[in-house]
Amino acid sequence: MHKMLLAVGKGSGSFEVWTADISSSKFDKACLYDAHDCVVTGLAWAFDGCCLYSCGQENCVRAWVLHGSALCEVSIPSNTPGLRSSNDLPNVFVSCLGVAASPGNIALAMVRNVDGDSLDPMYEGRLQKAVVEFLWIGGQQKDILSPSSSDFTSEAFLGFSANELNCWESDILWYLTKYENLDNPLVVWDIVAALLAFKQSAPKYMDRILVKWLSVTFLGSYKGLSIGEVLKCIPENFSKITSRQLHLLNIICRRVILSDVKAEEINCKVNLGGSAAAKAEHLTLWIELLFSSEKELRERLVGFSLATFINRFSDSTTTFSRPGFWYPVGVEQMELWIALNHDRVRDQLKVLASEVRKHERRLQSSEYGVEEQCIYCSESVTFDSPEVAHCHCSNSTDETVQIYQMARCAVSMQVCPAIPLWFCKCCCRRASKLPPETLFTLPGYPLDFKSLTESSVKEIPSKPLCPFCGIPLQRLQPDFLLSPSPV
Ligand SMILES: [Zn+2]
Ligand SMILES: [Zn+2]
Ligand SMILES: [Zn+2]
């Protein structure tokens, strides 16, 4: 794209739209609109420059769609996919101070100034000067001339027009495919919120959107398969799927489909088959899908780690852990994991693991091969799960025996210290070691991990990301240090 649109708000209440030619840095004024009575306080483009939202000091927000080189006003969708949020402050806004579209253009945020006189001066009046108001814009009409696209067959429900539902569907699908581009950070709170709302109010509609997305992304095209068929077919294609798409799939599985199941129960596969929730239609298929997707990522991470280990060893000119380079931790645990899943992991991993063992035999006096210890009683613990470790700690003073569960690091599979460094808000895993950046950019399952690790030079991760969800990890802090959640 060599053309860029620029909207400039003015004190008079009008705004101008300029087109900018990036290559020649030439600016042309396209049009001018007298949109507001007072100062234009905010302008936000959405849907790749298709829509413009403007707001003014007089407390008015307007939506515009681009038609050729002119803007036409459209109405902002008034319907919401879920329950209308309780409005604590009805009609107390006096002006609009700014407007911004959410990362996926599914919601609009507006900063609104509150009329101090209409609030209780002792309570709200002292605290609230301005509030942020959210509006769904997923159903935004973007074409004036052809309001309904013909290949959709939505029936109106929940007060949505068929056209609005089609817009929601195409917006969500457009948004999900945008994330295939690694330049777009994986910020998905708005799509998750919208899908959750539809899951509550119109589960069939949500299923239909997800089937289309899953079919196109993971099976190549949408052929009208049922959700059950689609969910079963997807894992066969995982080798060809980018890590980014697996991450997005995992987030949708956990945050939307399995939002009622505790992350720890999913990770440790506790009672999943028997719980009431799992009996619901297709839920077990979704859980299986999540497990296979996470196993695919685990195989990529383990393969990359083992190959890096071998490459560093074969290269006698470098010391093992060079500063500035990512190096694997937990090679021993990874070998144990491969042994534990011998029938389910690919052959390349087994070959890498046997090569690692040869190197380890030569290396007697290293940190490798050290037995893991319980972080409470220092007894040795065995490896029976990549997620957790158990110890039957014996307390010598009163002879009671307690079973302690310790989290294993999501990256190294080693037992985490009592306070591990990182925490993932999506899968609730902990990590004390960060994954290599390459994991997040893989276009598929690598045919040859060793040549891959040779070619990837700079490997110190610049951002702490969860290896399974692809979103930023959070620093684990005691609860009292965390600020209370916003209202
Ligand atoms: Zn539309
Ligand atoms: Zn113990
Ligand atoms: Zn995670």
Image: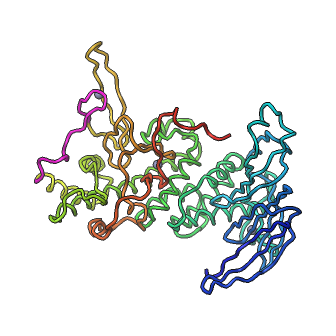
Q: Give the image quarter of residue 99.
A: bottom right
Residue 13: image location, x then y, percent: 85, 66
- What residue do we see at 56% from left, 70% from top? 221
320 or 364, which lies in front? 320
Residue placed farthest to the bottom in the image? 24
Q: Is residue 320 left or right of residue 172?
A: left
> Looking at the figure, which quarter contains the N terminus?
bottom right
Q: Give the image quarter of residue 436.
A: bottom left
- What residue do we see at 73% from left, 55% from top? 136
* Color style of the picture: rainbow
51 or 235, which lies in front? 51
Examine the residues drawn in magenta and state their main secondary structure. Answer: loop
Q: Is residue 17 left or right of residue 180?
A: right
Q: Give the image quarter of residue 85.
A: top right
Against 479, is 246 above or below? below
Q: Is residue 11 left or right of residue 418?
A: right
Q: Which residues are magenta?
A: 362-381
Residue 366 located within the stretch drawn in magenta: yes
- What residue do we see at 44% from left, 56% from top? 463
- What residue do we see at 50% from left, 61% from top? 245
Residue placed farthest to the right in the image? 37
Q: Is residue 36 visible?
A: yes
Against 468, is 477 above or below? above
Residue placed farthest to the top in the image? 398
> Looking at the figure, which quarter contains the C terminus?
top right
Against 194, is 140 above or below? below
Residue 61 located within the stretch drawn in magenta: no
Q: Is residue 303 visible?
A: no
